[in-house]
Image: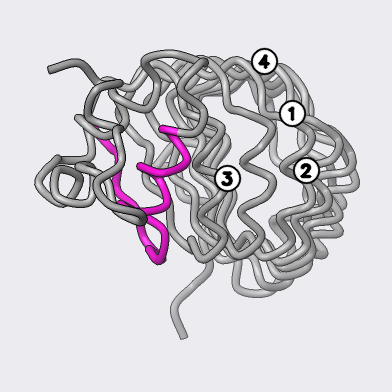
Amino acid sequence: MSVLSLYHPIGHSQCLWDFVIPYLDNKSILLLITLDHKLARFRRVVVRRKFGTSELLNFSNIQLTALPAELAMLVNLQRLHLNNNQLTALPAELAMLVNLQFLDLNNNQLTAIPAELAILVNFKHLCLSHNQLTVLPAELAMFVNLQFLGLNNNRLTALPIELAMLVNLQHLNLCNNQLTALPNELAMLVNLQYLDLNYNQLTALPAELAILVNLQHLYLINNQLMEIPEELCRVANWENNPGYGASLTKHKK
């Protein structure tokens, strides 16, 4: 039986999908709704009936190569797991997920982040590690409630100064990129507690980082640093930890 033949209505308000959809797993559902752009009505029906009231969706580890734009219909969604797939791009329509707080895109093949996502001001947790990002959009600064940002294992060579606008950010992982310098404006991340810069190509650090009074962990292993600014080492309770490479951590009180 073809996909189209399944869509013939039964009575006035039901179709066979009312009975089929509950028995399909997420991988089968997403495979069906990405089959053909001509099946727009079909895709809307499937998404609405399968996931319409969901607050959490887990589509990880199912070899996705694309996302249907119809996912944007799920306005109640708060957590979306898309890690460990083969996504190369994201539909701009995801910006319609106005209640989204958690998005996991780790271990895909993304090369860019749509600037349209900047309107998702409820974002708190964004995971983008192990992709192929070379640049971050300046619009990232609009994620004003973001607390966790994972960007490790990408191909970033520089950071936009707008990143400093994420004043609620507590955890920033940038290890295993190709960064050669940091913007002085990072010192504006006043709530930052964790900063991982391991395995980059940094030759110097901004002395301004010393004003990050909430910073508890700063990791700098495998860079090209000749020294750590005295301003950082003089901050109360800091110690240099040669056993961990060029890293700093605060004394436990």
Compared with 101, 108 (above or below) is: above
- The reply to whether the magenta stretch includes residue 44 is yes
For residue 244, above or below residue 12: above
Using the rendered view, name the quadrant where residue 203 is placed. Answer: top right
Q: Residue at x 60, y 73 (%)?
A: 237
- For marks 2 and 4, give the one nearer the viewer: 2
Q: Is residue 58 magenta?
A: yes
Q: Residue at x 79, y 64 (%)?
A: 167
Question: Upstream in the sequence, badge 3 or badge 2?
Answer: 3
Mark 4: which amino acid?
A: Thr
In the rendered image, which residue does mark 1 sit on? Answer: 136
Task: Work out how far the residue at label 2 is from the one at label 1, CA to CA, in angstroms.
Answer: 7 Å
Evaluate if marks 4 and 3 touch, with contact meaning CB atoms under 8 Å apart.
Answer: no
Q: CA distance from mark 2 to mark 4?
A: 14 Å
Q: Which residue is mark 3?
A: 72
Region rendered in magenta? 42-61
Question: Considering only order in the chain, which callout, 3 or 1, is on the residue closer to the N terminus?
Answer: 3
Q: Under tag 1, what secondary structure?
A: loop
Residue 54 occupies which quadrant of the picture? bottom left
Residue 140, which numbered label? 2
- Decide which of 160, 144 is in the foreground and name it: 144
Q: Earlier in the sequence, mark 4 or mark 3?
A: 3
- Asked if the residues shown at circle 2 and circle 1 are in contact, with their CB atoms under 8 angstroms apart, the answer is yes
Distance from Cα at disc 3 to Cα at disc 2? 20 Å
Tag 3 secondary structure: helix
Residue 137 horizontal/vertical position (percent)? 80, 30
